[in-house]
Amino acid sequence: MSIPDIIIAIDGYSSTGKSSFAKIIANEFSFLYLDSGALYRGVTLFAIENGFISDDNTIDVPGLTLALEDLDLHFGEGGTYIGERCIESEIRGLGVAGKVSPIATVPQVRDYVDRKLREFGSAKRIVMDGRDIGTTVFPEAELKLFMTADPLVRAQRRADEMKAKGDEADLDAVLKNLQERDYIDSHRETSPLTQAPDAIVLDNSHMTMEQQLEWLKDVIAERFGE
Ligand code: DC
């Protein structure tokens, strides 16, 4: 099916399959996929490696804000980069996962990431996933999805993903991390995770990827005609 030049914003809870779904949408409709969480994860890795966040998650906000002025975080071949260095595998581990939500509460970090994300907006035909894409980054997006699923289903999916990569995954620890992130993401002051009033909810607890794509095609046909 054909689809007009639009921005598709996908927000929702952690591990609801937002990025997997966004990649499939990008592939199906020849859209550019952008993973906003990867940029928050990249800033987090940078903060850890440069001592801007402590073991108890205290953040040196002035130090980090200053350092962001020179941080060359970008997307490239195979994922996310700092300068020439591909950081795709480092940003997916539990070390970064445990600190990314506190880092993402810092307004200066959000400004930094928002600026990078909006640069892509003029391209249209993009699908971007995150927590505040339909509410803050692209409130004008023509199609907004809000994804959710049962927390235990999400934890199991995330643990399976980690095991498939050869990482250790304790289901209880994964569930705890996920619930903590949901809480912080939904309760922070700046751009909390909320459903945009014009977003369509997709609860995929018991849906396969094929079913989700069929669902989306129906939504698109209804909204934009074929
Ligand atoms: O989508 P993800 O799990 O890779 O996101 C990692 C963290 O980044 C998540 O806990 C919250 C934060 N995030 C955010 O605050 N806003 C976004 N648009 C995307 C991610």
Image (cartoon, grey):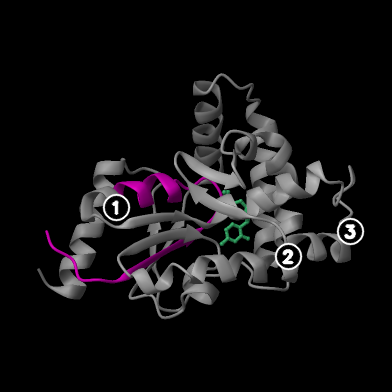
Which numbered mark, 1 or 2, is in the foreground of this view?
2
Picture disc at residue 25: 1
User: In the image, is 100 to the left or to the right of 17?
Assistant: right
When asked about the image quadrant of residue 147, the answer is bottom left
Q: Position of residue 142 (x, y in %)?
A: 33, 76
Whether tag 1 and tag 3 are in contact, CB under 8 A, the answer is: no
Above or below: residue 85 compared with residue 75? above
Q: Residues within 10 Å of mark 3 (few under 14, many from 20)?
A: few
Which quarter of the rendered image does ligand 1 occupy? bottom right
Marker disc for residue 60? 3
> Where in the figure is residue 52, as x and y percent of width and height?
85, 52
In the image, 117 versus 128, the foreground residue is 117
**Residue 118 in magenta stretch:** no
State the extent of the magenta-drawn residues as a range. 1-25
Please name whichever residue, 207 or 10, is drawn nearer the observer in this view of the structure: 10
Quadrant (top left/top right/bottom left/bottom right) for the N terminus:
bottom left
Residue 207 lies left or right of residue 175; in this view the side is: left
Q: How far apart are marks 1 and 3 (CA)?
A: 38 Å
Does residue 130 lie above or below 208 as drawn?
Answer: below
Q: Does the residue labelled 3 lie within 8 Å of ligand 1?
A: no
